[in-house]
Structure formats: structure tokens, C-alpha cells
Image: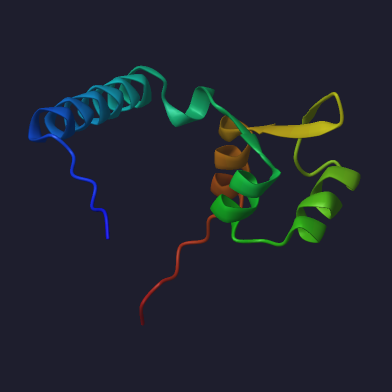
Amino acid sequence: METNSINPETVQILFDKVEDIRQLLLKEKKDYPLSERWLDIAEACMILNVSKRTLQNYRDKGILAYSQVSGKIYFKAADIDLHLKKHYQVVSVK
């Protein structure tokens, strides 16, 4: 039975590359706030905790604005944030 071993230096190089990618992603996230992002259907559903059908109803009824590019639907994160803020209800404790 043949075993393959990876050189420890190769493993370290791989870990270093992964860390470089992680740092780039963190920097991009910091430089690009959520309010300026465009979200696809899956991301919008996850943030709103609704089904794709409910999100479709929001589009059909004009509740949420959207953009369509080559058949793919996008929502502005800022619009979703505004929608949530408009429906925010403070509960008073008695």
C-alpha cells in the first residue's frame, strides 16, 4: 500500500495562501457595508426569514424594489433594511 505525504513546507504555504484570502475577504467586507450591497434571492430570503414565494409576493406587490439582470433577481440590502425598520414594533412591558 502506497502512502502519500505532503511536505510540511507545502502545507505551510497552503495555509498562508488561505490566510491571505481570508484577510482580503475581511477587508472587502469592512470597506463595503451591507447597506451598499446587492443581495440575490437566497440572501434576501435568509435575511428576511421568508420563503422564495413570499419574496416573489413582495416583488409582485411592490413591497420591495428589485433589479433583474439576465434573469437573475437582486435586492438592495438598504431597501430590505428600510422595509424591516418600517415594520419595527416596540413592545411595551406592563
Residue drawn at 36 percent across, 26 percent down: 29
Residue drawn at 76 percent across, 56 percent down: 52
Residue drawn at 61 percent across, 41 percent down: 80
Image side of residue 43 versus residue 24, left or right? right
x then y, percent, for residue 3? 23, 52
Q: Which one is in front, 75 or 13?
A: 13
Image quarter (top left, top right, bottom left or bottom right) of the C terminus = bottom left
Give the image quarter of residue 32: top left
Seen as rendered, the residue at the extreme top is 31
Seen as rendered, the residue at the extreme right is 60
Q: Which one is in front, 73 or 20?
A: 20
From this view, report whether residue 60 is shown above or below residue 17. Answer: below
Residue drawn at 85 percent across, 24 percent down: 70
x then y, percent, for residue 19? 21, 29
Image side of residue 9 versus residue 74, left or right? left
Seen as rendered, the residue at the extreme bottom is 94
Image quarter (top left, top right, bottom left or bottom right) of the N terminus = bottom left
Q: Which one is in front, 39 or 8?
A: 8
x then y, percent, for residue 15? 19, 33
- In the rendered picture of this protein, how many numbered marks are placed on residues? 0
From this view, report whether residue 62 is shown above or below residue 27. Answer: below
